[in-house]
Image (spheres, rainbow, N blue to C red):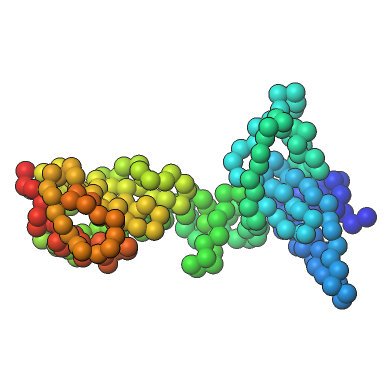
Amino acid sequence: MDSFDTLEGIKEYLKDGLSGFNRLLADRGNAAKSNEKGERRRLKTFWLLGRWQVDTFGQCHLIQGTLPIDSRHVESIPDVVEDLWVYLPEDTSLTTSIVYPPKADAVCAVCGVGWTLEDAQTARWYYRDEKFRHKACQHQEIETETLNQFKEAFNKADPARKYTFNPIPNEYCTCELCTAWYEVRVAGCKGFIKVGWRKRVINLDWSANGASVTVSDDDVTKGPSLIHAWGYDKLTEYLKVLLPSLTHS
C-alpha cells in the first residue's frame, strides 16, 4: 500500500516538516488524478495535526477555528488520525476550506519570514500578487492600505483642512479581512465623522457633528447624517459636499 495513504506512512512524511507535508500533498494529488480511462482513485481521508484534512480526492483542507476536545480524552489528538470525531464532543460541527500550505522555501511578502509545519496554517494566499503572507501581516497590510486611501479621499476633498484619524472597531463585521473604522476629527468642526468599510460600501456617518446634509441624489442608502459610498472616488465626491456644511465647534 502506498505510504501516502496510511497512518504510519503519513507520519513519516511529516517528520520532514513542511517540506514533507508538501511532498505528501503532491503525491496524494498525483495518485488521485484520472487515468487514461477517466477513472479516479479514491484515497482515504486523514486529519493532520488537528488542523488539516487530506481528502479522498487528493485535496487539502484547513479546519476553521479551534477543535473542542472531548473531555473523555485527556490526551491530545494524535498528529495523524482517520477518525477525528472520536476525540470531539458528539454535537461538534466542523467547517473546512480548501487551503494549501505554503512551500517550505516560501517567505511572507510583508515580513520576509517563512513558515514551518507548526504555523503553516497562518499563511494566506494573496491573489493580487500571487504571494503568501502571514494572516497577521496580511491584515496589517490591508489596514494600512485602507487608512491611506481614507486619508487620500479626505485630502482630495479639502486639502486645506487638518484631519485626525482615530481607529475604532468595525461596527459591521469582525472577520479577519475587514478593517477598522475611524473617527475622523476635522479641525474646527464639532464632533467627528465616522468612516469605514462595511463589505462592499464605505459607511460615511457625520451624526456626531450634528449637521443635517444632503450630499448626493445617488440611489444609495443615505439620510441627513449618513451615506454609503461605492468606493473611494464616491467617498471623495461626497466629502466635497459634506465638509463645507459641517457644524463648527
Residue shown at the point (73%, 58%) measured from the top left: 59
Name the residue furthest right: 1
Q: Measuring from the top left, give residue 31's x and y in whole percent.
A: 83, 64
Residue 151 falls left or right of residue 93: left
Residue shown at the point (80%, 40%) measured from the top left: 83
Give residue 200's quadrant in the image: bottom left
Residue 142 falls left or right of residue 115: left
Q: In this view, does 134 lie above or below 68?
A: below
Residue shown at the point (78%, 43%) measured from the top left: 80
Q: In this view, does 10 lie above or below 71?
A: below
- Is residue 76 visible in this depiction of the protein? no
Q: Measuring from the top left, give residue 97's x and y in whole percent.
A: 63, 52
Q: Measuring from the top left, give residue 232's x and y in whole percent.
A: 29, 63
Q: Is residue 172 above or below residue 76?
A: below
Q: Nearer the viewer, residue 39 or 111?
A: 39
Residue shown at the point (84%, 56%) measured from the top left: 43
* Quadrant of the snapshot with the C terminus: top left
Residue 35 falls left or right of residue 165: right
Residue 179 falls left or right of residue 128: left
Q: Measuring from the top left, give residue 166's x and y in whole percent.
A: 26, 45
- Is residue 88 visible in this depiction of the protein? yes
